[in-house]
Amino acid sequence: MHGHRGDNDRDSCVDITSCIAGYRGKPVVSASTRICKGLTCILGPNGSGKTTLLKTIAGLLDPIEGAVLIDGLNMSLINVVERAKIVGIHLSQIPTLPLFKVRDVVLLGRTPRAGLFFTEEDMAYVEEAIKRTRIEDLSEAYFNQLSDGQKRRVMIAMALSRKPRVLLLDEPTSFLDPFNRRKIFEILKEVSREIPVILSTHDIDLAAIFCDTIYYIDRGVLRKMESLQELGKIYGEGDTILDPFTLKLEPVIPKSDRSIHILGGCGSGTLYLRKAGSRYSVTTGPLYPNDLDAIVLKRLGAVVITTADDDPVENAIEHIKRAELLVVIDTPDYCKPPEARLLVKEASSMGKRLVHVDPASLGIADLL
Ligand code: ADP
């Protein structure tokens, strides 16, 4: 309800002060940070402590040490109704609610703020929450008859109808299809323009696109991610990068004394690497300077030679000599500068190990 002045109209912040979260004196995760407006994502493998931390922030679990303050209020020291007014939380389970229509479920979430009876004002907040989560068309449907993606949105509406100062969600996109995952992130992004939204997730691609701040739990410690390159490390993989074209996280090409040289162009080299991967360093070129491969492979950590460089042919020959394998993707002529085509001939006469790749096998023949 825009323009309405309530007690939640200030910008709220969550202060996690030297906090150790865990069960019966046994620590699971320690954290110390301040989280304000925006979409904040917490990543980490199963069992790393994401749920434990969210429950502690919500005041459902008392910290072993330290405290969680929301707008200065200690979540362990206030009563359950006050806490419920401040925090909207959706834990990962979806309840079974037979007999309830969607609007009733959303109204249930309003309970901590309502008096003996629901007023018009309560109903207005319910309608607003329904609108923000884009479930207007479902409001008269029975909750139990909805799809999982729809139920998730209803649960978010339920958490929002009380107009919380902070919204917490534990894996709100688990078990959803890619379309519904994205929709949930879009809705939460919108909500996070007004209040802090903190969620745990395994959707690292979506987190990389949508989240303003990403944290990850590294051996029991909550750490802020400074660069997307750290993402892969969380799950024990190498460095990663967000491919600007596909918006997918791609592994960064490793640094190695051994290398392969790729001659593709028009993005075919990137697709080849995505399919085949490489344990070795990658060199490529000569390519046209504005070629898709030249741009993306450089970002992924390859040595890229373009026709704008000095002596591109000699330079490429040096790389090909050192490479263990030359991969030639048989793209149309316009994808490779004349220098590259010349090189293929030379490399064959050098006796270099060479493989030809049909672009059709990369699924891009139609695009070229
Ligand atoms: P995540 O949400 O990252 O998958 P959790 O926070 O659920 O991780 O679990 C973190 C650790 O805390 C796990 O080792 C788990 O076994 C433990 N744990 C979770 N709930 C309880 C509980 N109620 N009592 C004791 N230990 C628990």
Image (tube, helix red, strand yellow):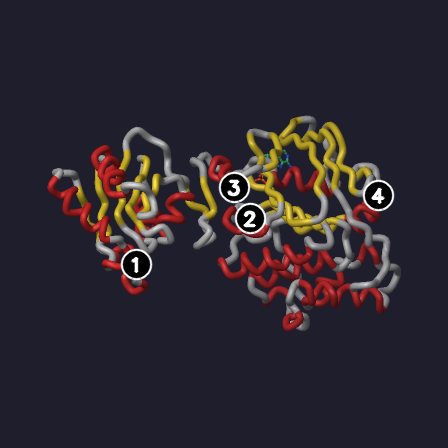
Residue 300 falls left or right of residue 335: right
Q: Please tell me how crowded label 3 is: few (under 14), some (14-19), or many (20+) other residues with Cα within 10 Å.
A: some
Q: Is mark 1 within 8 Å of ligand 1?
A: no
Q: How many marks?
A: 4
Q: Look at discs 1 and 4 and give the one toward the viewer.
A: 1
Amino acid marked by disc 2: Ala
Is label 3 in a helix, a strand or a loop? helix
Which sits earlier in the primary sequence, circle 1 or circle 3? 3
Can you identify the residue that label 1 sits on?
A: 363
Q: Residue at x 27, y 61 (%)?
A: 365
Which sits earlier in the primary sequence, circle 3 or circle 2? 2
342 vs 181: above or below: above
Q: Residue at x 45, y 37 (%)?
A: 239
Can you identify the residue that label 2 sits on?
A: 207
Q: Please tell me how crowded label 1 is: few (under 14), some (14-19), or many (20+) other residues with Cα within 10 Å.
A: few
Give the CA separation, mark 3 to mark 2: 10 Å
Q: Is residue 66 or residue 313 the one in the foreground?
A: 313
Q: Is residue 109 or residue 314 the one in the foreground?
A: 314
In contact (CB < 8 Å): disc 1 and disc 2: no
Amino acid marked by disc 4: Asn
Which sits earlier in the primary sequence, circle 4 or circle 2? 4
Can you identify the residue that label 3 sits on?
A: 228
Which sits earlier in the primary sequence, circle 1 or circle 4? 4
Q: Residue at x 73, y 43 (%)?
A: 58
Residue 104 x/y as whole percent: 73, 66
Residue 184 x/y as whole percent: 59, 58
Can you identify the residue that label 4 sits on?
A: 79
Amino acid marked by disc 1: Gly
Q: Please tell me how crowded label 2 is: few (under 14), some (14-19), or many (20+) other residues with Cα within 10 Å.
A: many
Residue located farthest toward the right when viewing the structure as drawn: 116
Residue 95 x/y as whole percent: 64, 56
Residue 107 x/y as whole percent: 75, 63
